[in-house]
Amino acid sequence: MDKILRIDMGAKGGPKVSEGPLGDYAGLGGRAMTSSVVSKEVPPLCHALGAENKLVIAPGMLTGSAAVISGRLSVGCKSPLTGTIKEANSGGQGGIALARHGYAAVILEGKPSTDDLYKIYISKKGVKISVDNSLKMLPNYDLVNKMKAEYGDKIVCISIGPAGEMKLGAASVAVTDMETRPSRHAGRGGVGAVMGAKGVKVIVIDTADSKIRQPKDAEKFKEANRKFTEGLRSHAVTGQALPKFGTNVLTNILCEAGGYPTYNFKEGSYKDGAKISGETFAEIETKRGGKATHGCHTGCVIQCSGTYVDKDGNFISKQPEYETVWAHGGNCGISDPDTLAKLDFLDDNYGVDTIEMGVTIGVAMEAGLLPFGDGEGALKLVEEVGKGTPLGRILGSGAEVTGKAFGVERVPVVKGQALPAYDPRTVQGIGVTYATSTMGADHTAGYAVATNILKVGGFVDPLKPEGQVELSRNLQIATAAIDSTGMCLFIAFAVLDQPETFQALVDMINAFYGLSLTGDDVTALGKKVLSMERDFNARAGFSAKHDRLPRFFSTEKLPPHNLTWTMKDEELDQVYNW
Amino acid sequence: MDAKETRGRGFEEKTIRISVDSKELPRFFPLFQEGVSVETDTGISVRDFLCASLGIDERYVEERISTIFLNGRPVDDLDTSIVGDGSVLALSAAMPGVVGATMRRGGYYAAMRDTISYRADENRPALNRGRIRLKLFNMILEEIGPSLLQAGVFVRVDSLKGALAGLVRDGFLEADSSSEYAGDVRIVVETLAGS
Ligand code: SF4
């Protein structure tokens, strides 16, 4: 990973390709790379769909190496949904494929003057860009099949569906998985719309003759990788709960805790939660001959994903994640697993974020457009988005726009982005992260990483009142660091509980790059990333006043605990005081 | 597969005894996600309920059942949390995600869900006999569900019908439309020898 590929889509005479050394961006990966480029090169006040915005696609620091579970890909830009800086993270094979061709980042710049649609083909021989208007409005699955017919099976696609072409706020960037299905998505913040604005439908990466990245110290790297793998396999969450049941194992727990937003955040527990739990999905998958344990990219040793098939064994979708099952399921009162898997497929196919889409449909239900629980109606609405009908375009623009269009008061967004699957009235601590994240409401922004091991900002006593703020701050810092390595965030649980597993991760980075980083350096990296992002947002016009939850969380009590959001604004404003 | 009725001693409800091939046992697991009832001493601590009443190994409780809810409230202390007649107790292994970590018993992130945490009630439930509704999730379900089924649990008739419908559909059981049951029924599910 010693070069950056820049493609100026607005160059005179057609897109212009240039390759250059890393320069100031040396040593960066993933979110650290995307946020550095965006904060340095994108004018914060630009229009997110304009020529000045850039779409940065960056593998993590260890991506493409033999490090396990290190294949994550970051996609960054100024977000058309939130207006803030954005990093959306995806699994799939995209990061590995780019890294093994030596690219630390692919940056799409400018904007074509025509409405031609382009495809970019990257292979050992170089980069080829061509107009292909036959791809217009193709859903992701059809598109990938077409690319396979054209370029063969040894390809990875990074693409947009119709939603991205229409530049809708919920549009995602799809990345193909190990089976070359476009089932993994950099979902949040409308990154697909920015790719659409650049006129790029698909980046096809030919993996033939690409090489695995080699560490500086092979022996030490191998040993650290072994210890790290061992740590992941021996932990109850990463070695058992996630492989067996996927992230959707959380449904029963959140319903029990009364923190599962139901019927557009009106209630905190879904009566039919057990019907759509991870346990239930795993049982259906196993019985029907799907797969309950599967990786989203090569080298994943946790394998929280799976394959969901119908009763005749035909593929419906990948195993839907917890956030998807919640957004389309409990949040909309839909309890049929087959319908939820179909919604997951449609979202992937048309290229929309499953969280944004599910929350948007919940808002539409609140508006009376269809009743809560109407699974067929929900499927039809996502079809409207794919077709680009006027209603579909409103829905595809996300929950905030839909709420405005239909006059809904209870619209669960922060900085324009839909809230994920945890109600902040029940788990007040996560509300702090939703409110203050540089990305808009984002559950992955402050993950349960080893802050007590890292001792970010000193040891926190979580029982002090200010503990929630400190915890959220530390989680956000540690997450920013992990997002930069290319590691899947789900390593966090093993790293949280097992100091030796965290050490193995640091050792792996050190052995790979010939460095001698300590936990403190990892912390410093996380802080640096957050500071850059925060600075970009400030220059884009965001202030502490935007770090707030919607008012209804403070005024409406959430059953069964009947709690409201009680965190004080002054406390929220302390998150970035370090 | 074989099902017959007996009248269980000490219980008002009839007991339905079901023998199944061990690989069909998971068909009964959804009952635990919704909750089954067990008759027990009440007014005792969660620890006593799990270890003394249910006979679960103390080390397993300490190390494996790291997430516990009592009446929808995350439990941090096994000894000061008291079960009463009608209590709902949910058991889970360690869970992913920041929220999964916050729910963990006595975990580092417990403060993040401070407002819903279980706090010992001044009106401690009286020592008595009663029923507790028990929910089992994820690995805990697979690991202790079978022995509870064998010991016998009370289930809602409607829920049981759902589990049995699958067995009828797949030809393991003959359809029997006569339904004299309502409310709760006690079931004992044993695995067939050698299965
Ligand atoms: S744990 Fe899940 S999300 Fe993470 S890399 Fe593996 S399959 Fe993908």
Image: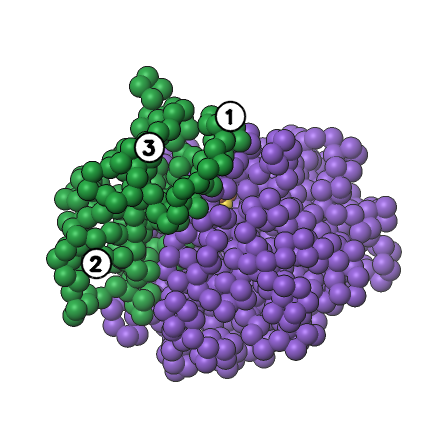
Chain colours: A purple, B green
In the rendered view, tell whether residue A375 sits above or below residue A311.
Answer: below
Residue A157 shown left or right of residue A231 in the figure: right
Choose the circle earlier in sequence order: 3 or 2: 3
Do the residues marked 1 and 3 share a common chain? Answer: yes
Secondary structure at badge 3 equals: strand
Q: How crowded is mark 1: few (under 14 residues within 10 Å), some or many (20 or more)?
A: few
Chain ID, mark 1: B
Choose the circle earlier in sequence order: 2 or 1: 2
- Residue at the spot of label 2: B84
Chain ID, mark 3: B
Residue A34 visible in the snapshot: no
Distance of mark 2 from mark 1, alpha carbons?
41 Å
Question: Where, by quadrant of the figure, is residue A76 drawn?
Answer: bottom right
Distance of mark 3 from mark 2, alpha carbons?
30 Å
Residue B171 - label? 1
Choose the circle earlier in sequence order: 1 or 3: 3
Q: Which residue is drawn at 37% across and 28% down?
A: B3
- Residue type marked 3: Glu
Secondary structure at badge 2 equals: loop
Between circles 2 and 1, the one closer to the viewer is: 1
Do the residues marked 2 and 1 share a common chain? Answer: yes
- Comparing A504 with A438, the one in front is A438
Q: Residues within 10 Å of mark 2 (few under 14, many from 20)?
A: many
In the rendered view, tell whether residue A33 sits above or below residue A66.
Answer: below
- Residue type marked 1: Gly
Between circles 3 and 2, the one closer to the viewer is: 3
- Comparing B159 with A217, the one in front is B159
- Residue at the spot of label 3: B5
Quadrant occupied by the C terminus of chain A:
bottom left
